[in-house]
Image (cartoon, helix red, strand yellow):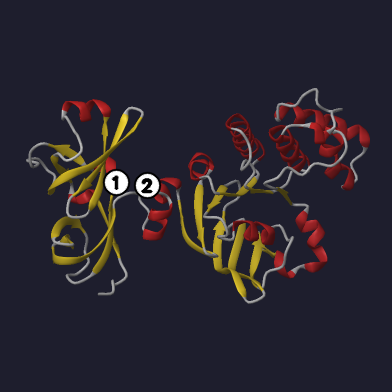
C-alpha cells in the first residue's frame, strides 16, 4: 500500500473549481515534486494534504488512515507532517526558540531539547546562530531555520511550498542539498511544489504536472522533461518543434505524417487519417549541406531563418515549410558556414519523432 494516497480530490472557491479529480499516490521515503504554472493549484493541494483546509470532495490517506474524515485526531495527524512555506515564517524570538518550538509543544523537557536543536543547527549550517534574533537573518538563513524547525519533530511527511522561490542561487543550492540530506538520513517523505522545472529535475524521484487544477501527467523526471506522452506537458516543459499534422499512410508500424505539404516518417501504429501532434528534439536533428545518405529516414531542405548563440551552442531556426529548430555546436556552425538565408538539409530518424494522438483541427 502506498504511504500517501489522494483519491478524486476536488476543491472549490465559490463557483470556481481550484482542483478537479486529483488522484495520485506517493511511496514512503519518496521525493515527489509538483510543477505547474502559477495558479495551477499547487499550494491548494499542499494545504489540503497538511489539513490546513478541507476539500470539497475526495479523500487523502496516510497509510490506511483516511485523514480527511478523521476530525477528532487531526492534531495527531498534523504532528506527523510539517510544512515549509515560500516566505520563511519565523517567530520574533531567537533561532534556538524557533527550532525548539515544536519540541516544546510536544512536551519534550528542556534538557532534551538543547542537543536536538544543536544538531539541527549544525546540519543546516547555522552553528553559532542559536542566540541570534530570527528576524534579523537573511532570507536564505531564515528558510534554513524554518526547515530545521520543520524537521525538529521528525515528521513522516515534509511539505515544501516553493521553498526557494525568492532566494539567491547559493541559498537555493543549500536548501536543495538540505532537503535531499534530510530525505536520505531520516527517510522523510518529501512533497514539494515548485515552478522551477530544473529544480524538479534535480530533486524529484517522480514529478506530477498540475495545469489548471488538473493533474495531467505523473512520471519520472526523464519522462516528464525529455519525452512526455502529453503534448500540453511537452509545451509547458519547453520541448521544441511541436507540430500538428495528419497520418497520410500507415504500414507495419511506420507512418507518413503530412505537415502542411511535406511528409515526415515516424514510428507509430496510428491508422491513416489520424490527427496527430508530434515533436522532434533539436539535438536529434542533424544539419548538412547535402541530403542525408545514412539511416535518417527524414531529410528536409530548409532555409536558415535565424541563429541564436548560447555559449558553445547554436540554436538554428529553420523554415522547412514549417518551422524547426536544430541544435549544433558553435564549431559545427562555423565549419558548415551557417548563416541566415542559407539552404541546409535537416535530417532525423523516424525513431526521433514522438507521435501522439492529436485533437482534430478545425478547417
**Taking 115 as reference, is 53 above or below it?**
below
Q: Nearer the viewer, residue 48 or 258?
A: 258
- Report how far apart the C-alphas of labels 1 and 2 lie in the structure: 9 Å
Which quadrant of the structure image shows residue 145?
top right
Q: Nearer the viewer, mark 1 or mark 2?
A: 1
Asked whether disc 1 touches disc 2, contact meaning CB atoms under 8 Å apart, the reply is yes
Q: Secondary structure at mark 2?
A: helix
Q: Which image quarter is the C terminus in? A: bottom left
**Taking 283 as reference, is 223 above or below it?**
below
- x and y, in percent, of residue 253 in the image: 17, 60
- For image coordinates 93% across by 35% down, the residue present is 110
Residue 9 visible in the snapshot: no
Residue 236 visible in the snapshot: yes
Q: Nearer the viewer, residue 41 or 345?
A: 345
Residue at image mark 2: 226
Q: Return the disc, 1 or 2, that comes first in the chain's sequence.
A: 2
Q: Secondary structure at mark 1?
A: loop
**Taking 134 as reference, is 300 above or below it?**
below
In the picture provided, is 309 more to the left or to the right than 38?
Answer: left
Check the image and name the residue furthest to the front. Answer: 341
Q: Residues within 10 Å of mark 1 (few under 14, many from 20)?
A: many
- For image coordinates 21% across by 55% down, the residue present is 322
Give residue 281's mark: 1
Give residue 191's mark: none
All told, the count of numbered labels is 2
**Taking 168 as reference, is 195 above or below it?**
below
- x and y, in percent, of residue 86 in the image: 67, 46
- x and y, in percent, of residue 312 in the image: 32, 27
- For image coordinates 7% across by 38% down, the residue present is 290
- x and y, in percent, of residue 157 in the image: 68, 50
Amino acid at each position: 500500500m502506498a504511504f500517501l494516497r489522494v483519491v478524486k480530490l476536488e476543491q472549490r472557491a465559490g463557483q470556481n473549481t481550484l482542483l478537479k479529480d486529483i488522484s495520485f499516490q506517493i511511496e514512503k521515503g519518496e521525493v515527489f515534486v509538483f510543477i505547474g504554472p502559477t495558479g495551477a493549484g499547487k499550494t491548494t493541494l499542499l494545504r489540503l494534504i497538511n489539513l490546513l483546509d478541507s476539500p470539497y470532495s475526495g479523500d487523502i490517506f496516510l497509510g490506511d488512515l483516511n485523514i480527511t474524515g478523521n476530525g477528532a485526531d487531526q492534531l495527531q495527524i498534523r504532528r506527523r507532517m510539517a510544512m515549509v512555506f515560500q516566505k520563511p515564517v519565523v517567530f520574533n524570538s531567537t533561532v534556538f526558540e524557533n527550532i525548539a518550538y515544536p519540541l516544546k509543544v510536544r512536551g519534550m523537557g528542556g534538557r532534551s531539547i538543547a542537543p536536538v536543536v544543536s544538531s539541527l543547527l549544525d546540519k543546516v549550517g547555522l552553528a553559532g546562530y542559536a542566540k541570534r534574533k530570527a528576524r534579523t537573518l537573511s532570507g536564505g538563513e531564515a528558510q534554513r531555520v524554518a526547515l530545521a524547525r520543520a524537521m525538529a519533530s521528525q515528521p513522516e511527511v515534509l511539505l515544501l511550498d516553493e521553498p526557494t522561490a525568492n532566494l539567491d542561487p547559493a541559498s537555493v543550492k543549500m536548501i536543495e542539498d538540505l532537503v535531499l540530506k534530510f530525505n536520505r538520513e531520516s527517510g522523510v517523505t518529501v512533497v514539494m511544489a515548485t515552478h522551477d522545472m530544473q529544480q524538479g529535475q534535480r530533486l524529484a524521484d517522480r514529478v506530477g504536472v498540475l495545469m489548471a487544477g488538473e493533474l495531467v501527467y505523473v512520471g519520472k523526471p526523464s519522462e516528464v522533461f525529455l519525452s512526455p506522452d502529453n503534448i500540453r506537458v511537452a509545451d509547458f516543459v519547453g520541448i521544441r518543434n511541436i507540430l500538428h499534422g495528419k497520418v497520410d499512410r500507415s504500414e507495419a508500424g511506420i507512418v507518413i505524417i503530412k505537415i502542411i505539404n511535406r511528409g515526415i516518417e515516424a514510428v507509430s501504429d496510428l491508422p491513416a487519417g489520424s490527427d496527430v501532434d508530434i515533436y522532434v528534439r533539436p539535438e536529434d536533428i542533424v544539419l548538412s549541406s547535402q541530403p542525408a545518405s545514412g539511416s535518417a529516414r527524414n531529410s528536409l531542405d530548409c532555409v536558415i531563418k535565424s541563429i541564436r548563440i548560447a555559449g558553445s551552442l547554436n540554436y538554428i531556426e529553420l523554415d522547412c515549410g514549417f518551422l524547426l529548430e536544430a541544435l549544433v555546436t558553435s564549431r559545427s556552425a562555423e565549419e558548415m558556414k551557417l548563416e541566415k538565408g542559407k539552404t541546409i538539409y535537416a535530417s532525423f530518424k523516424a525513431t526521433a519523432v514522438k507521435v501522439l494522438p492529436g485533437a482534430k483541427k478545425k478547417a
